[in-house]
Image: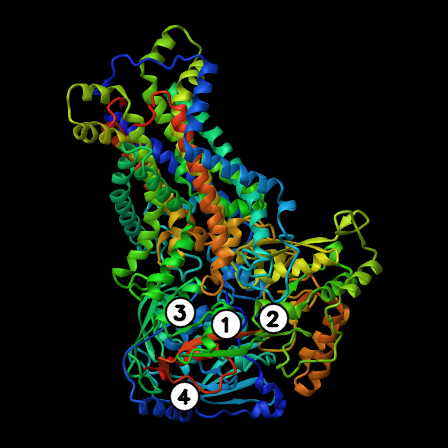
């Protein structure tokens, strides 16, 4: 399960008009520069090893949702464009993109003479096939194509996407879906493709043992030039301590999934390693089921915010790698609104709010009202060693003011279903609040939103969301989302904890890592640029 | 195929008068220094568990020392702090409660079920044996861990769930061992003799069969207490243990594994407690077996 | 004899069917829906239409008895179905790829355990209440008492990190087997040692041993010929039911050492509600356990002729 994509929205700072004209630098120039550097260091051959924490369940476009999968897939398959390590939209198979002023057509000019691993040529037909296939509802990536009507093949190297409705996130979200060769995919079907993919990427799949390791072999015919190493391997190592040890012993060169925060600190002082810290877009938070009688009063929820010493959670459990959240959007988000009600740590304030709401301290120290205890259960993910301690600390803080938060653990599939159906009372994760693609909280805060885990129903919020969707100009959208954030802070449908930093460690044995990094996951999409020193 | 090659010439059944026998057993047990040491340790653990609130220097869950995450042992905090800056010693002391409850109760439940089912199956044989063996086989072939995961998901993990699930599922091994022993005992002459004299089945099982299989059961059970304490830690490893913030040795240990490189003491101290406890129960088990077994000659 | 065998096999089959039904029910009792896992993490909104389409694709929208019968019928034809979560890979491939890993680990570990435990257990019984006995006792208690994930991590720290002798994870070379096998053998060894000691102790004072002694057989001969042979009886039982613990026993070792065995496959599949994999795995496993039980019973009869097979 991915933990929120570590991409942010740099081009939110540019105006809508500029965005529409946004025609991006050609990939070729960028890559020649980087490759030239690596060659100059005289490195070639060898093997790069990365580690993930979970099995790589499939290798097709439907599997790109989880980071560990993406790290493998994007070295085998290429998308038209992707959001790169400096959070800019980078051209990959597309040379240039034109976005119509009304946002209803996207014209992709493609690189010519690009070959798939089987030798066939990549053309606009493959784009049409891929987009139209994966937009069908049976696919997990289908919702990325929301608003798309069809893809027109203008000529062999030009594809034009026609939209039924504006989807501001289309380029970033759909553009990231990697292109499959139409003929091969049609002959083996998607399930076949997921196990034996053929793409335009710098590597081919040499062996795939999902729970153990996936080995990729260099594809010399790659359109951006042959990769610098012979093989790229992703090992599955569930235990964070073992990942740390493997980095230290040289059994691996990088980790796709974080280590424990304490281990990161040790690597920071080690000249043989590079520690990459990037801001995450989605806050760690505790969604509260606001339908429950004991959680339906917003004063109770506000009181809980005052009761939490969130800086302490950041200091103790993230080793300081994080910022207390004031909004569900991250401070680096262009739509971020700092002028919202704040909740400094103030247990006295929390107590008086609870008193005001009619909850009085009972005999066991837990507050009661009309015979009901102020108690609920927070269900964290089974075996989640990073976030469960946060729930444990929150539990202690809440208890101080007379709120009982019991803890339970359950598998992700149970949590997701329980939240969607309103049978869970609370949880702790950072997937839903704080979008990577659009400031609109359509799925999470709209009263009938598909991921409205909190059962939040607020007329003004519904109205603002509808309004925001109909406005195209970012400047005009700004005040709308400033207000949604204010509303969120006032209503507290979820207890916001903090925005953590994603910290990843790379061994300096692996050469060619970019200097400036603002988003770490896309680093793994550039396997063709790295060499082994 | 009925007679073993070295079948004894009419082994005399144990016929000592009961009080004298109990006395002798006790004396034999007390003569075993290791067993006595084990008993003392277990008694100490019981005291620790019962009087935890008075013995523990701090509250196991609520007393948090800001900025002391993972800080190692010192004079005031002999076991250091855990990953949430709580006093580890206090948590380990409170953990004794859970360890003993889970270990002893689960073992008791499983021994009771296992011995009854095994003895009945082995003694009566026939269709009773078939049905009971079928249940035992099915249970043994059904992965315990699956049952635990599912029950934890359906009922929600808690102390009661843990005790009942472990106790209710691990009895199969007792049943099998007891059944096998009873099957071979059934053919012994004193049992046959008792039967011929018209003794009532339940009485034969209780008087002659059960005492004879007890040695094996005790060996198993003395191991079991430890295994169950370990199983509890394995459940915590999988996120299915007793709910936090309740302090359990297994829970502390499994939380500590993420910090094994930086704060090794978090995992060491509860691990040490588990080792000591298991050792103590094993010595008691050995002592009991030696003392109970009337055939045994001391000092061999 | 043949009718007994047939009967036992039929009984075994019945156990397997019983277990498969139980597993099916138990898995569906788990709250949650695997479809949500397929649909990712909530970053990208999902639609009801998508959920329905995916449920239909996997037949999850059918009535439960029908789902069971379809699955069971396919299983009888040797078709284990496809994994919901893992790219529609045939479940049979997943299981039979994972089995050798776990099987090898267990065979090596058991072998090592027997090699160490039998001599030590016998020595402890014969030299009862001496330092040999006490040492064995403590070693065995330590073996049982040390939680295996802790031992595993400590061994990795020492042998992979500090000494750099062995790899920290994986089975890329034969060295990769060493640490996981040692961890697993430690536990097995501890149990076997105690069982052996107990069994020998129980036999030593028995009359047939006395008889053998009185016949003037040498102490060593008595020991090996009679005592050890008879002590194997409970040992065989214990080994037999260790098999039932393979699945749960290797989960932790496989997780820590990142080994792709059935223990990890099983837990991952349960947690991800990958119904087909769990159901098939449990059935394969049940067949194995039933088979081993059968073998154990025959070995029993072989070792202890007092038990009649009738």
Crowdedness of circle 2 by 10 Å Cα count: few (<14), some, many (20+)?
some
Give the foreground label among 2 and 1: 2
Q: Residue under circle 1?
A: A135
Residue drawn at the location 74% of the way across and 66% of the way down: A306
Q: Is residue C121 above or below residue A381?
A: above
Is residue C116 among the parts visible in the rendering?
yes
Sequence-wise, the earlier of marks 1 and 3 is 3
Viewed as shown, does residue C196 lie left or right of A460? left
Separation of residues labelled 2 and 1 (CA atoms)? 43 Å
Crowdedness of circle 4 by 10 Å Cα count: few (<14), some, many (20+)?
some
Q: Residue under circle 2?
A: A315
Crowdedness of circle 1 by 10 Å Cα count: few (<14), some, many (20+)?
many
In the depicted view, which residue is nearer to us: B191 or B183?
B191
Sequence-wise, the earlier of marks 2 and 1 is 1
Residue A271 percent coordinates (x, y) = 41, 81
Parent chain of label 3: A
Colour scheme of this structure image?
rainbow
Q: Which quarter of the image is occupied by the C terminus of chain C?
A: top left
Give the foreground label among 2 and 4: 2
Q: Which quarter of the image is occupied by the N terminus of chain C?
A: top left
Give the foreground label among 4 and 3: 3
Q: Residue under circle 3?
A: A51
Q: Secondary structure at mark 4?
A: loop
Q: Residue under circle 4?
A: A157
In the depicted view, which residue is nearer to us: B75 or A250?
B75
């Amino acid at each position: 399960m991915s933990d929120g994509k570590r991409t942010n929205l740099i081009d939110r700072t540019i105006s809508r008009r500029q965005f529409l004209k946004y025609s991006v630098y050609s990939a070729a120039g960028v890559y020649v520069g980087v490759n030239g550097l690596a060659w100059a260091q005289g490195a070639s051959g060898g093997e790069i090893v990365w580690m993930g924490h979970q099995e790589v369940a499939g290798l097709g476009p439907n599997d790109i949702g989880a980071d560990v999968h993406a790290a493998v897939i994007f070295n085998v398959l290429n998308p038209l464009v992707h959001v790169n390590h400096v959070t800019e939209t980078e051209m990959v198979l597309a040379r240039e993109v034109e976005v119509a002023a009304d946002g209803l057509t996207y014209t992709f000019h493609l690189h010519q003479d690009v070959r798939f691993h089987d030798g066939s040529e990549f053309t606009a037909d493959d784009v049409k096939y891929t987009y139209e296939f994966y937009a069908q509802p049976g696919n997990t990536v289908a919702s990325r194509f929301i608003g798309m009507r069809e893809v027109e093949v203008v000529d062999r190297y030009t594809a034009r996407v026609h939209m039924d409705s504006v989807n501001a996130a289309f380029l970033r979200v759909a553009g990231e879906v990697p292109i499959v060769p139409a003929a091969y995919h049609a002959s083996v079907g998607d399930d076949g493709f997921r196990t034996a993919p053929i793409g335009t990427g710098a590597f081919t799949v040499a062996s795939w043992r999902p729970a153990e390791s996936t080995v990729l072999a260099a594809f010399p015919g790659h359109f951006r030039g042959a990769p610098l190493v012979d093989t790229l391997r992703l090992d599955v190592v569930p235990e964070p301590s073992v990942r740390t040890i493997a980095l230290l012993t040289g059994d691996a060169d990088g980790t796709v999934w974080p280590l424990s925060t304490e281990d990161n600190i040790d690597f920071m002082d080690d000249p043989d390693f590079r520690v990459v810290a990037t801001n995450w877009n989605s806050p760690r938070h505790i969604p509260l089921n606001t339908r429950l009688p004991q959680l339906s009063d917003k004063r109770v929820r506000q009181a809980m915010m005052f009761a939490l010493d969130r800086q302490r959670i950041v200091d103790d459990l993230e080793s300081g790698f994080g910022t207390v959240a004031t909004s569900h959007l991250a401070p680096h988000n262009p739509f971020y609104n700092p002028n919202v009600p704040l909740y400094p740590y103030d247990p006295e304030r929390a107590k008086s709010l609870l008193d005001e709401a009619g909850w009085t301290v009972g005999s066991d120290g837990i507050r009661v009202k009309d015979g009901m205890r102020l108690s609920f259960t927070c269900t964290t993910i089974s075996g989640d060693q990073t976030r469960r301690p946060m729930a444990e600390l929150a539990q202690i803080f809440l208890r101080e003011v007379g709120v009982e938060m019991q803890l339970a653990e359950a598998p992700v599939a149970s949590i997701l279903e329980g939240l969607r159906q309103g049978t869970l009372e609370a949880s702790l994760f950072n997937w839903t609040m704080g979008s990577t693609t659009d400031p609109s909280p359509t799925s999470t805060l709209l009263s009938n939103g598909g991921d409205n885990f909190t059962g939040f129903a607020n007329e003004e919020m519904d109205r603002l969301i509808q309004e925001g969707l109909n406005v195209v100009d970012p400047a005009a959208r700004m005040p709308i989302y400033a207000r949604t954030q204010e509303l969120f802070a006032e209503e507290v449908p979820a207890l916001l904890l903090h925005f953590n930093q994603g910290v990843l460690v790379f061994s300096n044995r692996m050469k060619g890592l970019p200097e400036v990094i603002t988003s770490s996951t896309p680093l793994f999409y550039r396997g063709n640029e790295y060499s082994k020193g | 195929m009925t007679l073993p090659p070295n079948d004894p010439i009419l082994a005399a059944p144990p016929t000592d008068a009961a009080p004298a026998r109990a006395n002798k057993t006790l004396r034999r047990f007390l003569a075993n220094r290791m067993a006595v040491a084990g008993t003392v340790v277990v008694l100490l653990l019981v005291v620790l568990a019962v009087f935890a609130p008075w013995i523990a220097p701090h509250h196991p869950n609520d007393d948090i020392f800001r900025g002391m995450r993972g800080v190692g042992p010192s004079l005031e905090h002999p076991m250091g702090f855990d990953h949430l800056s709580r006093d580890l010693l206090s948590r380990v002391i409170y953990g004794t409660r859970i360890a003993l409850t889970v270990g002893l109760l689960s073992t008791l439940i499983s021994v009771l079920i296992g011995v009854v089912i095994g003895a009945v199956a082995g003694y009566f044989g026939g269709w009773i044996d078939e049905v009971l063996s079928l249940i035992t086989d099915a249970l043994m072939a059904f992965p315990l861990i699956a049952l635990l995961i599912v029950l934890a998901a359906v009922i929600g993990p808690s102390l009661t769930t843990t005790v009942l699930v472990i106790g209710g599922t691990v009895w199969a091994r007792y049943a099998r061992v007891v059944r096998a022993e009873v099957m071979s005992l059934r053919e012994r002459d004193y049992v046959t003799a008792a039967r011929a004299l018209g003794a009532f089945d339940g009485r034969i099982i209780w008087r002659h069969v059960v005492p004879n299989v007890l040695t094996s059961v005790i060996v198993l059970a003395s191991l079991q207490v430890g295994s169950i304490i370990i199983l509890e830690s394995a459940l915590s490893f999988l996120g299915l243990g007793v709910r936090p913030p309740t302090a359990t040795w297994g829970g502390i240990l499994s939380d500590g594994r993420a910090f094994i490189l930086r704060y090794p003491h978090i995992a060491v101290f509860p691990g040490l407690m588990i080792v000591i406890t298991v050792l103590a129960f094993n010595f008691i088990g050995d002592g009991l077996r030696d003392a109970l077994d009337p055939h045994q000659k001391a000092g061999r | 004899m043949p009718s007994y065998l047939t009967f036992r096999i039929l009984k075994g089959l019945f156990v397997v069917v019983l277990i498969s039904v139980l597993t099916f029910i138990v898995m569906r009792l788990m709250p949650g829906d695997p479809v949500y896992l397929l649909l990712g993490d909530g970053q990208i909104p999902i639609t009801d239409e998508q959920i329905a389409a995916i449920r239909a694709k996997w037949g999850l929208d059918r009535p439960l008895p029908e789902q069971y019968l379809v699955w069971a019928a396919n299983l009888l034809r040797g078709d284990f179905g496809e994994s919901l979560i893992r790219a529609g890979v045939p479940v049979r491939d997943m299981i039979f790829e994972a089995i050798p890993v776990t099987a090898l680990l267990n065979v090596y570990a058991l072998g090592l355990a027997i090699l160490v435990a039998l001599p030590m257990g016998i020595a402890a019984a014969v030299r009862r209440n001496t330092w040999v006995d006490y040492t064995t006792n403590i070693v065995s208690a330590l073996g049982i008492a040390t939680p295996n994930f802790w031992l595993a991590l400590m061994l990795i720290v020492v042998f992979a990190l500090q000494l750099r002798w062995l790899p920290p994870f994986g089975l890329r070379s034969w060295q990769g087997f060493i640490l996981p096998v040692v961890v697993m053998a430690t536990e097995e060894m501890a149990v076997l040692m105690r069982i052996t000691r107990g069994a020998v102790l129980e036999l030593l004072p028995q009359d047939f041993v006395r008889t053998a002694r009185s016949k003037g057989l040498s102490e060593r001969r008595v020991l090996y010929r009679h005592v050890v042979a008879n002590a194997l009886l409970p040992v065989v039982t214990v080994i037999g039911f260790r098999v039932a613990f393979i699945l749960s026993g290797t989960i932790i070792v496989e997780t820590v050492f990142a080994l792709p065995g059935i223990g990890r496959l099983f837990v991952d599949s349960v947690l991800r509600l990958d119904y087909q994999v769990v159901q098939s795995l449990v059935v394969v496993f049940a067949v194995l356990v039933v088979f081993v039980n059968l073998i154990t019973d025959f070995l029993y009869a072989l070792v202890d002729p007092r038990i009649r097979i009738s």
